Image (cartoon, coloured by chain):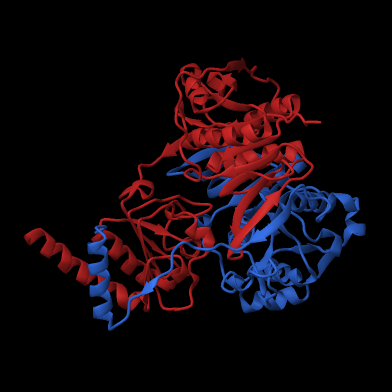
Chain colours: A red, B blue
Amino acid sequence: MNKQFGSVWVIAEQIDCRILPVSLQLIGQARKLATELNTSVETVILGDQMDKRVQQLFAAGADKVYLGNAPELAFYKPEMYTEMIVKLAKEHQPEIMLIGSTSMGTELAPLVAARLGTGLTAHCIDLIIDDNKILEQRIPAYGGLISIICPEKRPQMATIASGVFPHPELDESRTGEIIHLEIPHEIPLRVQTLKIVREEPGGVPLESAPIVVAGGAGAGDIEGWRIIAGLSETLNAALGSTRPAVDEGWTELETMIGQSGKMVSPELYIGVGLSGELQHMVGIVGAKVMVAINNDAKAPVFEQVDYGIVNDCREFVPMLIEKIKEYQEKKITC
Amino acid sequence: MLKVVVCVKAVPDPKEAHKIKIDPATKTLTRAEVPLVLNLLDKNAMELALLLKEQLDANITVLSMGPPAAGNIVKECLALGANQGFLLSDRAFGGADAYATAYTLAKGIEKIGEFDLIICGMASSDGSTEWVGPEMAAFLKVPVVTRVNEIVEFGGEWWKVKASLENGYRLMRVKLPAVFTVTRELNTPRTLSFSGIIKARKKEITLWDLHELGVPEETVGQKGSPTIVSSLATVNSKRIAEIITGTKEEKAEQLVQKLSDAGVI
């Protein structure tokens, strides 16, 4: 009495015809989930001139690709993308649907979920198949992890940030079936993208920086934040943040590290004036050395790093900057 | 007249929310008295509504779903300048996930009547899903733009807005009625004025329970939620900090030495 499960789907995303890394990472994870459910991995990709790129999806682990390939699909169109995915899902009844937590994915996923009448879990940091063959979707909350399941409705839907799952090894010999999708007509286009503007981010990119300095609410104000930024500059590090720092307006959302932000894996991580909320800490994957500076000796962050300094960060960081500069000068003269 | 609905949420005060924790022994949430406050990004939603009211002929309705105590945040929005406030409150609404929340709010909006624009914060500080705005739009069958950070053109049937993207933005043209979810960058919310508080005292909040909302019990709250929390777990860290002690200078010197020894600076 083996139950036959529907496929594991990944809604892949492209920008300027390039498939995003998160889509390939999700296909890699989908492969693992599909093996446990004894089912297949299927991917939906909507774009223009994508024919040559589809092979990447197979190489990452997809068995079948639903391809919408037309000039009208070059850029994300909320209503048309939603309509096409909803129609396809109703037809093929996938068991699971995974989407990257990009700005497109974060808008598209709830539109699709509401139309399909199913549940959706945000920014998962792990996905496993439980003993009942149900998808356990883990997210950090309340200083620990909570598991969310969608016991009855299908598909079980989740969004996941880039970097949560590793890049799969690409097997270029893998191939699969391509199903070409028709472009639906008579879709109301009440929301239209007129222009997409991408600005080159300045400074060292967080995701690949060897040193990351992250600041939190303990900065106190914008002056305190500048002190932390000064430490980052001294170390030629990338400056990251926690949600409270973003909410205070000291820094941009793009610098946020964690569950709903960026994933980093530096050689050295220094957390300054942050308490160590798991939503932030899950964003630091495999750092070699971790340091925390916080005036509260009981802050949970001290249970998650290698070296701790109990001190008001605004007082301590200027001294640390001075000592690092001395060290750097000595290193050059030696 | 432009009819604006602002959806707001009462959330545990983010400054004290860390008091609610998972008990390692019982794997349940520890009870803590954390006051409810107006969700931070909902203040930006409210500010947009007030700016529109100042520049156009607009009427602002505030809508929330929550326990009776959430009435305070609806009152706060009335004091800021909203025209009327509604609170959907019933035990049956409890335990709702984003889907059931969006559904219940959408039913509330349908009952309130016609609307041109629904505004809500991009996400709540306690849920952080970003689902409620778009799911509401799907239930109400109207378009949505999420992460709106600038209103470029407004007043007519079609509006132009900018919405934030990774390292950039998209310029969108959208036909009303529509839902916008807004970011912190959109504006700087005003603070409460004394005269506003006095004026709001005379305004009444309309309370609707399950019966008055007129929806089946199985479509709202925990029963109407496709997702459930199946378990809670604490996390054991693989690291534990060696606390460096001494004077400020000694601590800095020791830390630099340790980082140098580890070869990371």
Q: Is residue B212 visible?
A: yes
Q: How many labels does the image show?
A: 0
Q: Is residue B54 visible?
A: no
Q: Position of residue B141 (x, y in %)?
A: 75, 38
Residue placed furthest toward the front: A1
Near-viewer residue (B127 or B36) = B127
Q: Where is residue A275 in the image (x, y as percent from the top left)?
A: 48, 70
Task: Please report the residue visible at 38 percent of the width from the left and 55 percent of the height from the top.
Answer: A287
Near-viewer residue (B6 or A79) = A79
Q: Position of residue B159 (x, y in %)?
A: 60, 41
Residue placed furthest toward the left: A333
Using the rendered view, name the quadrant where residue B204 is placed.
bottom right
* Quadrant in which the C terminus of chain A is drawn: bottom left
Task: Please report the residue visible at 72 percent of the width from the left and 40 percent of the height from the top.
Answer: A133
The reply, left or right, for residue B245 in relation to residue A20 is left
Q: Where is residue B17 in the image (x, y as percent from the top left)?
A: 61, 70
Q: In this view, does A44 lie above or below B89?
A: above
Q: Is residue B109 above or below residue A213?
A: above
Near-viewer residue (A174 or A72) = A174
Q: In this view, does B193 lie above or below B161?
A: below
* Quadrant in which the N terminus of chain A is drawn: top right
Using the rendered view, name the quadrant where residue A188 is placed.
top right
